[in-house]
Image (cartoon, rainbow, N blue to C red):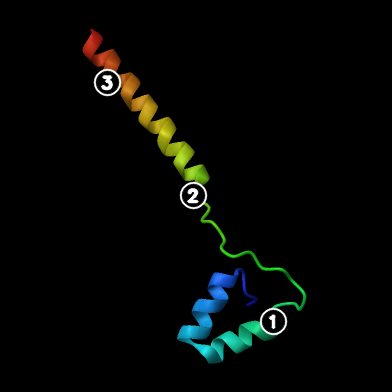
Amino acid sequence: MPFVSKAQKKYLYATNPELASEFEKETPEGINLPDRVSRQTKRRNRLTQRRRRRSQREIRRRTSR
């Protein structure tokens, strides 16, 4: 499995150098790795925002009756 980011590479060399060397062999040479890779939670956040808005609307409807 190749490295995905510089942070992952740094962490793996610090904790498990043997595994890191295996990863290094599988990572293509000359590739420019990003410093960090962001988590893919943007979609989840959008969904929770929608759910929050819907629940607030329902609360307003209930109290206005």
First reached walking from the N terminus: tag 3 or tag 1: 1
| Kind of residue at badge 1 | Glu
| Within-10-Å neighbours for mark 1: few <14, some 14–19, many 20+ | few
Q: Look at the numbered disc 2 and give the secondary structure of its residue.
A: loop
Which residue is drawn at the image coordinates 69% and 81% (left, top)? 26
| Relative image position of residue 40 (x, y in whole percent) | 53, 52
Q: Name the residue under label 1.
A: 26
Q: Quadrant of the C terminus?
A: top left
Mark pair 3, 1: CA separation: 54 Å
Q: Which residue extends farthest bottom?
A: 18
Q: What element carries label 1?
A: helix
Quadrant for the N terminus in the image? bottom right
| Disc 2 residue type (three-letter) | Thr
Q: Which of marks 3 and 1 is in front?
A: 1
Asked if 36 appears above or below 57 in the picture, the reply is below
Quote the CA–CA distance across marks 2 and 3. Answer: 27 Å
Q: Which of 29 and 19 is in front in this view?
A: 29
Which residue occupies 54% across, 56% down?
38
Give the number of the mark in front: 2 or 3: 2
What is the spatial separation of the Cα atoms under label 1 and label 2, in whole angstroms?
28 Å
Q: In this view, does 34 lie to the left or right of 59?
A: right
> Can you identify the residue that label 3 sits on?
59
What is the three-letter code of the residue carrying label 3? Answer: Ile
Classify residue 59 as left or right of residue 10: left
Image-based side of 55 in relation to 36, left or right: left
- In the image, 37: left or right of 54? right
Q: Which residue is drawn at 65% across and 83% down?
A: 24
Residue 10 picture quarter: bottom right
Residue underneath mark 2: 41
**Numbered disc total:** 3
